[in-house]
Amino acid sequence: MHQGLNEKSPPRETGALLSDNTNGTQGKKAAIPSHLYKLVNDLVEVDKRDSALLELSKKREDFPGLAPILWNSFGTIAALLQEIVSIYPLLSPARLTSELSNRCCNALALLQCVASHPDTRSAFLSAHIPLYLYPFLNTVYTYRQYEYLRLTSLGVIGALVKMDDSDVITFLLQTQIIPLCLRIMDNGSELSKTVATFIIQKILLDDQGLAYICHTFERFSTVSDVLRKMVLGLVEQPSVRLLKHICRCYLRLSENKHAREALQTCIPNELRDNTFATELQDDSEKLTRKWLQQLL
């Protein structure tokens, strides 16, 4: 069972998601042991599913080849989706237990494995599976079991955008992912804010994503207002990791002519007056300082 969410110790998948290594474990080749095939088969048997979900979620990063097996095995994806939709009635009013949240998060971790694999990502999108996660992103309860469900769901979307695949951005722009992420950026925990901002950043870094957000002033101002509020929040509760993603979002917005003009009055003074100089003085934050200098 997962440990309770700890703000200072993010889940392993979250830390990997926000790292600069875009390949993850994809480059490693490891033979799939026979007992993993049995665990995959156990997913379709209700009485064996809980144990199989736990064991497979633990081992997924060690065996990148697990994703195609999950996708192509009879009934497996349907079983994972069954785990997800069974949680919907518990989202509101708040009746979700930590045990059920952990079980669902194990299913989501396996979907993240499928989402990030090059051989299954396209089919994953074609089946519109990310839409099954949106009810979790739409929750507002701050209880730990809901927060962990939100964070793990964000991890699946984050794994998709991390691949720098334009087809992923095309799909996401046809959904409600931007307003969902903006609401989490506005009201979520530091970890959820960080992953949601990372997703917006990756959408912006794609040309069609930048064009979409800057297409109308309303869209641009909605994103800009949330970024500004986050900067003000960092004055009270600093987070270098979150500040890094915010600066990158602003810098990318500035590459659009109309957005650049608007940003002259929209960028918070706290980014101009060295408010975060202490947080950014470490050598490891050289890139963030560079982005901030370019922006100003």
Image: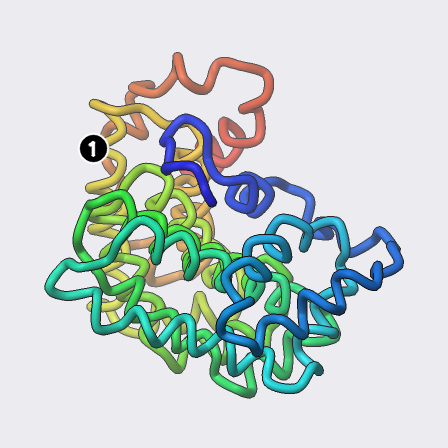
Q: Amino acid at mark 1?
A: Leu
- Along the line of sight, the residue nearer the viewer: 4 or 1: 1
Circle 1 — which element?
helix
On-image quarter of the C terminus: top left
Which residue sits at x=27%, y=66%? 179
- Please say if 226 is above or below 259: above
Colouring used for the render = rainbow
- Please say if 145 is above or below 268: below
Q: Look at the image and tell me whether residue 264 can be seen.
A: no
Residue highlighted by disc 1: 232
| Horizontal and vertical percent position of residue 167 | 59, 78
Quadrant in the picture for residue 113? bottom right
| Horizontal and vertical percent position of residue 147 | 29, 48
Horizontally, residue 200 falls left or right of residue 75, namely: left
Horizontally, residue 277 falls left or right of residue 72, namely: left
Specify the farthest residue to the front.
47
Crowd tier of the residue under label 1, counting other residues whose Cα lies within 10 Å: few below 14, some 14–19, many 20 or above: some
Horizontally, residue 11 falls left or right of residue 174, namely: right
- Along the line of sight, the residue nearer the viewer: 133 or 160: 133
Which residue sits at x=27%, y=43%? 144
- Along the line of sight, the residue nearer the viewer: 70 or 216: 70
Quadrant in the picture for residue 126? bottom right
- Please say if 151 is above or below 191: below
| Horizontal and vertical percent position of residue 162 | 59, 57
